[in-house]
Amino acid sequence: MSSNLQDRPTPEHTDWARENRLFELRREAERKGYVDADSVRIAGAPFPKASPESGYYGINLLKEPQWSWEIPPYFFVGGAAGAAAVLGAIAHWTGRDQKLARDCRLLAAGGAIVSSALLISDLGRPARFLAMLRVFKRQSPMSVGAWTLAAFGSFSGAAAFAQIAADRYGLPVRMLGNVAEVFSAAAGLPFSNYTGVLIGASVIPVWNEHIHSLPIHFGMSGLNSAVGILELMGHENPALNTLGIGAAAVETLEGVNIEVSRKPAAEPLKRGTSGFITRMGGILSGPVPLALRIAAAFAGNRSSNQLRKAAAISSVAGSMLTRVAWVQAGHVSARDWRLPLEIEQKKELPFIAAAGKPVSKMVKRA
Amino acid sequence: MSTTTAFFTDSTLCIGCKACEVACKEWNGLSDDGFHWSGNSYDNTGAVGHSTWRHVKFVERAPEQGIGGNSPELASWVFSSDVCKHCEVAGCLEACPTGAIVRTEFGGVFVQPDICNGCSYCVVACPFGVVQRNQDDGRAFKCTFCYDRQKVGLQPACAQACPTESIKFGPIEEMQLVATERLQELQARGMDDACVYDPTNTSVEGLHALFLVRGDPRQYNLPPHPEVPTVYNKAGWTSSAVAAGLLLFGSLFAFLGSAKR
């Protein structure tokens, strides 16, 4: 009697996580007819093998990127803020649009703050960011990028601060703000696109295969989103539309470049979830705004602004999706053991179908 | 002789006992990694990672007469203990933005845990998929080459625990010589498929952990052409400069062409 009772889980003796796992397994078995887990071999499937054709049991040789969710938005915000600093400085110094220049300063500084917050959040503790500024290593794009962020943050912050101090409180800091603005734009130039170098100079095949185009791709994506955000803030300067056309044209070319690529490393940009996000991002930041903006250039004043707003929303969303897509493609690419092992792609092998999910338990835990 | 040391892991002597895995975990106080049953031969470890710095690979081969006196009817096994390669030019070390990853006086690549800030850029810079961030802790970890033990003149824990001297440790010149001699010996005995894995012809420029394996190194997840990602830097920054130029001159063009507001 008492031994029977001990076999039954009582609330205080039950590990509910493990108990729920049993229900999960049962549901999966009911739904699919088999359970898909490590070490479970579906009837008729070949034995897992380590061979020159299958690598080491199809376990990925490279580690997946371990950045947390903050990194794609960091790429997005940094790109937009860097480009905004350049736009603002040029709008200011060419004397074409002072109101735009003012908003660019605020946008750049705001972006720098958000960028830092995202990066620090990814690192886990604020003090950890300071370790980035221990040394400068030009061979490390992460180091160059961290210093660029530090410089960009300082100068864009100073420029925006001087702007507010001069406008609101009449403090005599306009000159200081103008100097900071120049330095902020100088840092903004690399800051808007360095993330392309950052991921391109890695061992992840889909990234390093595109090292020649990634910085241009990301830089123009940043410009695209900066123009979009400024338009959504209410700016109607036709120069923004011109820049938007240029950026969208480059993004369209990049999309075509990816679509026609026959390299095996480019697969994650065309297949599966990462491929879908890449295409969505590409369409929203390339052809859609391009068509809308060209139409806007010839349309009447009122419909022109509506077309530009639509293009702005599309390119901001496309720019964000593009960064998500590239990071996601990096994950898929890292899991594909065939690329670093230089094993020819054979799509029919069940092994390779299984390679879509992380096989190594350590990767899974991570 | 230099103070540069190296591992030479001879898979033809490995018996798959995993003493090195256990010794490494115990000496370095590493956490467990899940107690999963993989179904991949007798390897339930999978790969090296933040909590696994030695990993014995199990490769099953067709029946053949092995050097250990295998019966010709039985499938033969090859075991190979994997570890951080401590590359001559190390991707992780080049990529580390904090200077946390350094080269020690013994030529090993060491992650200083008090400096690592967990940016995880080294993870995507290692062509062998060795270094990994511990997501609970936030920092990156990998084989230290038992820097603490080497400091006091001891050999690394894995080499110390290896019962068959499959894991050899010593000055790098000596290990390279031992590897060459062992390869010649095996080839003289008719083992034509043996080879020493040391990609000196790539940008990695050689390893401080040599491996003697039988058959295609790819079945041990050893890449034919590992590259240090710094080889992409020049192309990347050139493209970055082009992007900056497009942004700068594009903006100048657009604003100069527009009316004053």
Image (spheres, coloured by chain):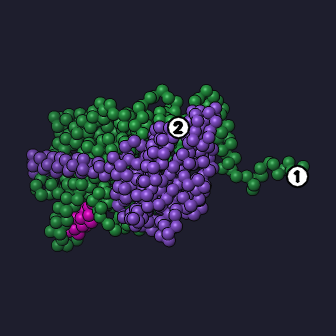
Q: Are the two marked residues, 1 and 2, in contact with CB atoms closer than 8 angstroms?
A: no
Label 1 neighbour load within 10 Å: few <14, some 14-19, many 20+: few
Task: Name the residue rendered at 42%, 53% in the picture.
Answer: B176
Q: Nearer the viewer, mark 1 or mark 2?
A: 2
First-in-chain label (1 vs 2): 1
- Say what secondary structure mark 1 lies in: helix
In the picture, measured across the screen, residue B226 lies left or right of residue B158, that is left
Label 2 neighbour load within 10 Å: few <14, some 14-19, many 20+: many
Q: Position of residue A265 (x, y in %)?
A: 36, 37
User: For residue A50, which numbered disc appears in the image?
Assistant: 2
Residue B164 appearing in the image: yes
Q: Position of residue B3 (x, y in %)?
A: 41, 66
Q: Position of residue B26 (x, y in %)?
A: 60, 61
Residue identified by numbered label 1: A2
Magenta span main SS: helix
- Residue with the most extreme right position: A1
Q: Colour of chain B?
A: purple
- Cα distance in 3D space between marks 1 and 2: 50 Å
Query: Type of residue at label 2?
Result: Ala
Write down the region rendered in magenta. A148-167
* Label 2: chain letter: A
Task: Name the residue rendered at 66%, 50% in the picture.
Answer: A17
Q: Position of residue A26 (x, y in %)?
A: 67, 37
Query: Type of residue at label 1?
Result: Ser
- Say what secondary structure mark 2 lies in: strand
* Label 1: chain letter: A
Q: Is residue A215 above or below residue A31?
A: below
Q: Which chain is green?
A: A
Of residue A82 and residue A210, the one placed in the foreground of this image is A210
Q: Is residue B82 magenta?
A: no
